[in-house]
Image: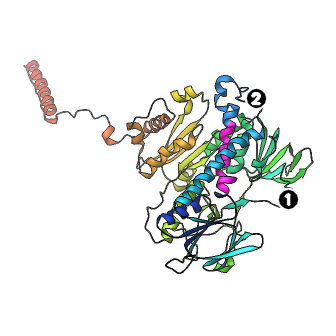
Amino acid sequence: MTETKSGFDYDLIVIGSGPSGRTAAIQAAKLKRRVLVIDRKDRLGGVSVHTGTVPSKTLRETVLNLTGWRERSFYGRSYRVKDQIKADDLKARLDITLGHEVDVLEHQFNRNHVEVLAGMAHFIGPNEVEVEIEAGDTTRVTGEKFLIATGTRTYRPDYVPFNGSTIVDGDEFLEMEEIPRSLIVVGAGVIGVEYATMFSALDVRVTLIEPRDSFLDFIDRTLIQEFTHQIRENGVDLRLGSAIERIDDEDDHIEVTLENGRHVRGDMLLFAAGRMGNTDKLNLKAVGLETDHRGRLQVERKTYQTKVGHIYATGDVIGHPSLASTSLQQGRVAACHAMDVPTVPESPWFPYGIYSVPEMSTCGMSEEELKERGVPYEIGIARFRETSRGHIMGLEHGMLKMLFSLKTRRVLGVQIVGEGATELIHIAQAVLNLKGTVDYFVQNTFNYPTLAEAYKIAGLDAFNRMPIPEEYKDKKPAKDKKASVKKATAKVEAKGSNTGKSEG
């Protein structure tokens, strides 16, 4: 093995090949540095490709297509593209998509001369890791810089009797042998909400249990209220404030006993309440690093350096926001900093996307945040049914909400629920990052008919209730003051003259 100029085997060793590890490795390789990616799987891509982002979104698209969900407003709730949908039908598209993802990633690594080593890595010194490549076989490699991008794994508490078939976690869920007639989902986080609403679209009876009194608290409450109404209308039994006392595997069904005394029965249970950082096997003590109670690492958010300067961490392993999209950016920024190369910083505003049915997406601040900060604001709202495109698509629901500053007229936040929300949000992201105002949406033309036209409707809704700027006020011509004075004087003189004549 040829050593680098620094004397180490590699300039950068990346542990994990998920979104952030992938972009970091390719970015460093494009800078002509020697890069090694270590992944414990025999297939690249990490959780994002194999059990997380890509599979769940592929499953969602498959469900919506096979059920004819998007056409039911025209043809009735009984309409289906395929009458009998089985688990194999859901997996078929999934296998093809994942194969393509892995092929593209392998090609990118080969094209950029990124080396790959399959195995489990752990630190044995500040600049050295040992990798278990096969049962009993190990190899050691050294690196000048390291990036930890190991992601997360499902949280599996002791009180849940996981059996891999009818009581499963989020990673096992996609391996189901058959579609259950009824499903219990524990945890109304992003993963739980996405799977619960997807299977409700399959006409599976779904009960979604959340111990807290609210869910998805980072999203605007108006949006959550709209979303809650829609999923309940679609058949999801949402149980908020329902803490679990016991979960029993009764062979022919699963029974959940709640602390309030109620019982929930189902054919399958998905436990989706939290994830843990994949750091326990890295032997971080060897390099002086510690994690929080969830196995996550703390980093400097501008550079993604840990407290050990030559070791970086990105992606879900550092916690919030735990999005594949932000992880892709984090990897690029971290690699550039590690290689001492200046780069364009990350944008302050990024979108959240929740691929539920219906989907949701937000960018910027929520109404609750504005109230907490004491920011004076105005709201603009548009319903998708107000657009011609909405009528064409048969959309009965869907809403776009915008928040504007009353002082500067700038866009402060946008929230969307409904068809195409995760695509539409990028218009808001651009205007937010460019510090645009409500006037942008009033002045500009949007393609007709499109759902994006909802931006104009919401913009006008807010514009018409906001203070009118000076340049838009109706300015009537000012009267000539001199002419007014002359006219008034003439009237007085005429009155006096008439009075004199009558007295004479």
Q: Magenta includes 48? A: yes
Q: Which mark is residue 474?
A: none
Q: Quadrant of residue 479?
A: top left
The percent position of residue 498, horizontal first and vertical second, equals 11, 21
Residue highlighted by disc 1: 159
Residues rendered magenta in the picture: 47-63
Question: Residue shown at 62%/41% (left/top)?
Answer: 359
The kind of residue on which mark 2 rests is Asp
Q: In the visual, does 63 lie left or right of 257?
A: left
Q: In the visual, does 257 lie left or right of 276?
A: right
Quadrant of the rendering where the C terminus is positioned: top left
Classify 244 as above or below 389: below
Label total for image: 2
Foreground tag (2 vs 1): 2
Q: Secondary structure at mark 2?
A: loop
Q: Is residue 373 visible?
A: yes
Q: Earlier in the sequence, mark 2 or mark 1?
A: 2
* Alpha-carbon span between mark 2 and mark 1: 38 Å
Q: Secondary structure at mark 1?
A: loop
Question: Residue shown at 51%/54% (left/top)?
Answer: 374
The kind of residue on which mark 1 rests is Tyr
Question: Residue shown at 43%/48% (left/top)?
Answer: 410
Q: Magenta includes 136? A: no
Of 483 and 295, the residue lying toward us: 295
The percent position of residue 414, horizontal first and vertical second, equals 52, 45
